[in-house]
Amino acid sequence: MKNTAIARVFRDIGDLLELKGENAFKIRAYQKAARAIEHHPREIKTMLYEGEDLRSIPGVGEAIAKKAGELVSTGKLDYYENLKSQFPEGITNLLTVPGIGPKTANRFSNELGIASVEALEQAIGDGRIAKLFRLGDKTASNILQQIQALRRKDQRLPIGEVLPVVDEILDCLRSVPGVRNMTCAGSLRRFRETLGDIDLMGSADKPKGVIEAFVALPQMGQVLAQGSTKASAIAHGGLQVDLRIVEHSCFGSLLQYFTGSKQHNISLRERGRRQGFKLSEYGITDASTDRLEKFADEAEFYNRLGLQCIPPELREAQGEVERAEQGTLPKLVELSDVKGDLHIHTNWSDGHNSVEEMALSARELGYQYVAITDHSGGRGIAHGLDEERLRSQIAEIRMVNERLNGIRLLSGVEVDIRADGSLDLSHEVLSELDVVVAGVHSAMNQSEERMTKRVLSAVENPDVDIIAHPTCRLLGEREPVAIDLEAVFRAAAGNNKALEINAMPERLDLKDIHAFRARGLGVKLAIGTDAHSVAHLAFMRYGTGVARRAWCEPANILNTLPLEQLLAFLGGD
Ligand code: DGT
Ligand code: CA
Ligand code: CA
């Protein structure tokens, strides 16, 4: 049983207890544990297997640890089964609709026999809900709107599809006269890998003009709501975009509030309350005088609370508030810290551009170096290189290096890790290269045991420098392979090998929580774009985003090293 499944059970328990009218403290304990387990970088199953105490997970106490143990060992939880049997199946789904609390859900269920969102939709359609509340159609149609919004949010879109569109929209809005600030907030600003909807925040002399420009943008389809300071619309592709505009003096508080995450804001608010402050999207109110202090600048908002300004990528309620209080937040890696790309393809294998074209574009980005890592040929990957072609490519790279100033090409390869853990090219040719990236590209259905052994052989192979896309997942398309990442991380740290954060937006592999754990164990991470054309070199921003969510500083990232130090690392075994 995976952490996500365990978390789902605890979340459901929280909901059922809410329906039962249990005390809020108990309910929150389950919700908190569910969240902690879902985002925990290690599998509970492994922890139990290794005899570790689950209470080391923040928010997991004795009772919950025991229940998690029962779930993992028996696949079932008596307490949960018993609780479920007291309610109609599926009723907790009603609670996911904003505005429907336990009381309402119970009424729907008891008085109308409604226990699913679909049934509720039907009952709104045939007028039963309007009648139940004797409030008329307004309440019913509000609920319907919430259901529709929820459906859209359920289909979370990958960040790679969203960010380019949002960049365009922001550019247009920034050119509206009187606009001073204009930026994204919400999960996009925190750089989550998938997004429910897009939140945009701005400040302007005349908000109304910006709202009008927004709903008229060519990227926008149906307008859901439009007021004088905010609007919501559906962009092509089905993505909901919410925009809010305030006066300049309030922008910092607005941006802070709507960047979230909700949990981060809750911890800030709780802390603020202890200091005698009330926090809101309007600013900070001194509870003793009721005076509201506004903030034009988000950093000042945090400073006023006695905190360092917390980078958006860290705002996930994982201890960042405490660190900001102590003044010990990490100094996160930035795109400008990256000195080169360690994973790119050319037209020697399945890439579109020549070695020289890739080199020129990399130089344009200000890089010191770029590693040419085309595929090896053994398994029939598109035009993969055999030893002979690889040697010819090494010769070409040498020539281009002589011709070009201002960038150093590293000769490399993305060598296939075969099903048995051996590499697709001989030690002899691999040792002629500057950098060897090894990755799994076939037989992805192996058991966890075999896959782990397979990747561990590559980690332990002295010819290998970097393991590419360690879980092989494709966002929304292919599940990660079964692999004991903890073992891989420990081996990588022990053998001084780097693991990749593959920056291709459909990969993002390692993903945030895995990169977080690897970094914690002292593993060096290499951000590689896996570029198959010059345009793809720009994917580096996605990789950096993941690294930042993993709390990485420049020192954690291999390709922030200047050339000489990088070569020392690569040659150091
Ligand atoms: P998403 O859209 O599901 O990818 O995730 P977010 O984090 O963008 O969530 P969203 O769009 O519902 O709201 C944006 C932020 O605004 C959220 O992270 C925190 C803040 N926020 C919105 N509504 C509430 C609320 O009712 N209470 C609190 N505390 N914060 C809220
Ligand atoms: Ca959002
Ligand atoms: Ca939103």
Image (tube, rainbow, N blue to C red):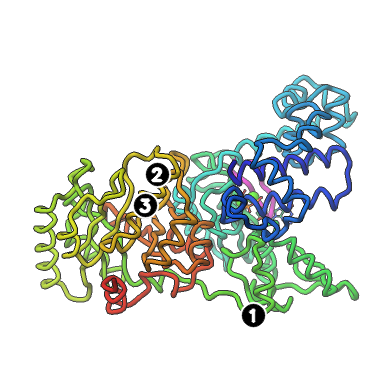
Q: Is residue 25 left or right of residue 309?
A: right
Mark 1 residue type: Gly
- Location of the C terminus by quadrant is bottom left
Q: Which residue is mark 1?
A: 327
Mark 2 residue type: Arg
The magenta-colored residue range is 223-233
Dot 2: what SS? helix
Camera-nearest residue between 397 and 489: 489
Query: Which-is-in-front pick, marks 2 and 1?
Result: 2
Image height check: is 158 above or below 334? above
Query: What residue is drawn where x is 60% and y is 75%?
Result: 329
Of labels 2 and 1, earlier in sequence is: 1
Dot 3: what SS? helix
x and y, in percent, of residue 1 in the image: 59, 41
Q: Which residue is mark 3?
A: 455
Which residue reaches farthest top? 126
